[in-house]
Image (spheres, helix red, strand yellow):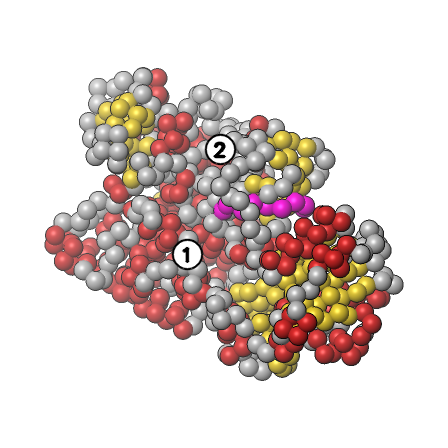
Amino acid sequence: MNACPFSNPSQVFEDLAQARDQPGLTWSEVMNRWVVSRHDDIVTALHDPTTFSSRPTVPDMPSHVLEAFSGKVPLRGTLIGHDNPIHDRLRAAVNTFFMPRRIARFESWIEAQAHALIDEFYEEGEVDFRARFSSPLPLKVISHIVGLDPDRSEVYFKALQFFSSPGPEKLQPLVDFHDEAMAAIEARRYRRHDDLMSHVWNLRDSGEAEMDDFEMLSLFPGLMLAGHETSANLIVMALTHMLARPGAYETAQADDASRSRAIEEALRFEAPITGMPRRVTCPVNLGGTELKPGDEVFLAYASGNRDPHYYERPEEFDVERSGTQQHIGFAQGIHACLGAPLARLLLKVEMRVIADRLPNLRFAKAYEDREYLPVREVRALVDTPFAWDVTDEGRAKAGRHPKPSEIGNDDGWMSGHVIERRKVATDVVEIVLAADAGALPAWTPGAHAEIELPNSLIRQYSLTGGQIDDGRWRIAVLREADGRGGSRFMHDDLPMGSKVRVRPPRNHFPLSGAGPILLIAGGIGITPMIPMMAASDARGRSSHLLYLGKARAGMAYAGDLEARVPDRVTVWPAQEKGRFDLSGYLSALPAVTTVYCCGPERLIQAVEQACETYGLTCRVERFAPAEFDVGTNAPFEIELRSTGEVLPVAADETILSVLGRRGIFVQSTCQQGTCGTCEVGVVEGEILHRDSVLTKEEHAAGDTIMVCVSRCAGKRLVLKL
């Protein structure tokens, strides 16, 4: 090992390789910590946050700083600075926002911003690429996504530099930044937008996130600093490696899939985070070294990513690398990088725009002469000069792309408004929606739609009524006194003319098959049954509706149904008629009957149990996730829809690990169900959800699973793979 290991940034990978080959952990005089260099030891510590506290990631502030920050700047202004239970409570408010399929709506805005930056310097032919492009772009992006002004991103950057290089002259700018952020938070309290601040307010208002305003303020500074710094450094390091290897850059730029693959290799080969410290809280043996409380370790992600026991050819940079091993460039566990999906999207867009705008890109100094900043948590080049050919074709592209201010988010929403509303039962209001322009999409019986209310709350409702293609949507909403606020708003604060946004409907509860149908509705579960009954009539299928409720006054549409089809509807208010003999009723049905049920969980479980007893086909629509025993694991099977192949999943295995062993790569970051990266579609089967990133409605829909933690509640899941 070098005379002073971990002191020379150009030799740090050699030092780490030697540390991996030595028994136990390696003590670093430079870091004053034990260096954890082997992949499996790093992962062990990442998944044991109780033993390995993240407190050292945010150093304690001196007294004069504490005085200046008192009541203005949260002292641990980043999630990684918190241990549980505080960490999970705060992170729950932002997890769902950064899921890959949700963050994708910002792609066009990011691309427009990238083009605008290149327009500013294209004619120069050579610039410090980090200073002019790879640093300003993520600054603007993360400012926009958080809910701050992207045109002030440089001001925010200078203020946040306090955390990486503290100085007395930087105190007031940081206080000013927090004042501006708090003002934006307060503004979002009453007027929501499509940004992270509004998202957190929505969850606070619904009771799904618990925090005060000062805790909410603490979420954003660390996210903005880390979200900018890592992306800014990764892209320039990755480009130097690609451009130094014949054909690598061209291969990486073949298409978006190639770009994404090259980015993952860059994150493995030389991630922008060398590692992170942890403090030991109780006696533990890690990697053969006995550690005591108070000891500190440095989890060297960069070393784990080049561990030859985990990766083939780890010292090679290969933009076409394939395999199922997951790198730890974004860490794992509860502290896995929150913004990893955004970083991946941003880096892919950067690569695409660079390929389009900067022909013959080259690193404007010898590859072997590149220099790095001193060894610390962040890995970064000292200077990043890049050059390209300035051509007439390139000049013609300047100013041809949409401006960021002209770009909306690619979120799939349509604008609409309320055109009718009426009370249809005690605590039930019917609302009819129309599009602001054109018609709302047609739908099929059993479908539901997402509706964003004027206060930015998003809720899902079954579509109802007999007309499915008239360009209007009809829903019925039950006021839930103990709900999360959506139904109360729709009853009290959504008058005629109110503006809403809607997504195209989805259907997890369609009519299928042939033969007679029994529709069982419990309470507000009547809504999908009305169009399903009309559709069964149109198809010439025999159908009967069993409508169960507590009191007739609270049973929406009951009188209308009895008047229109009295011989095919059984309305059963329990207060008048007593408890309905559900088991006896189902036992008398012909075996060819298909039973459809929507209503409270207790009703659904009773119907499912009776149908299983009597051999009836049963299909259900839930308002909430099914309740399963989550304390124990049972073996099950997964089926790959594309091939029909069936793979067993043992009680001590995850779906992710089984897929990996079969050679099927599903990208994963946290491996604890908190980032949403490993989401896979589900065609069939009951899911035992253990993630913290899907919404309650998504859990209930049962059409997607986080394969790193969630399992099957039955015998088999059919996956969209």
Furthest residue to the front? 578
Quadrant assignment for the C terminus: top right
On the rendered structure, is 278 left or right of 230? left
Give left or right: position of 573 versus 535: left
Where residue 28 appears, x then y in whole percent? 23, 26
Query: Which structural element holds mark 2?
Result: loop
Q: In this view, does 332 lie above or below 627?
A: above
User: Residue 428, percent across and down?
Assistant: 60, 75
Crowd tier of the residue under label 1, counting other residues whose Cα lies within 10 Å: few below 14, some 14–19, many 20 or above: many
420 vs 613, nearest the viewer: 613
Q: Which residue is drawn at 22% across and 62% down?
A: 72
Q: Is residue 687 magenta?
A: yes
Are circles 1 and 2 on residues that touch, CB within 8 Å?
no
Determine which of the numbered discs, if any, sits on residue 532 in the image.
none
Stretch in magenta: 683-691
Going by the numbered disc 2, the residue's amino acid type is Gln
Q: Is residue 236 visible?
A: no
Viewer-proximal residue among 618 and 178: 618
Q: Given the current orientation, which residue lies at the most extreme left position?
A: 64
Residue 61 visible in this rendered orientation of the protein: yes
* Residue located beneath label 2 in the image: 326
In x, y percent, where is residue 341?
Answer: 48, 47
Q: Nearer the viewer, residue 617 or 86?
A: 617
Q: Identify the element where label 1 is drawn.
A: loop
Classify 626 as above or below 269: below
- Residue 166 falls inside the magenta stretch: no
Q: Earlier in the sequence, mark 1 or mark 2?
A: 1
Q: In which quarter of the image is the N terminus?
A: top left
Q: Alpha carbon of mark 1 to alpha carbon of mark 2: how far?
A: 26 Å
Residue marked by disc 1: 93
**Amino acid type at mark 1:** Ala
Q: Bin the neighbour count of mark 2 within 10 Å (Cα to Cα): few under 14, some 14-19, many 20 and up.
A: some
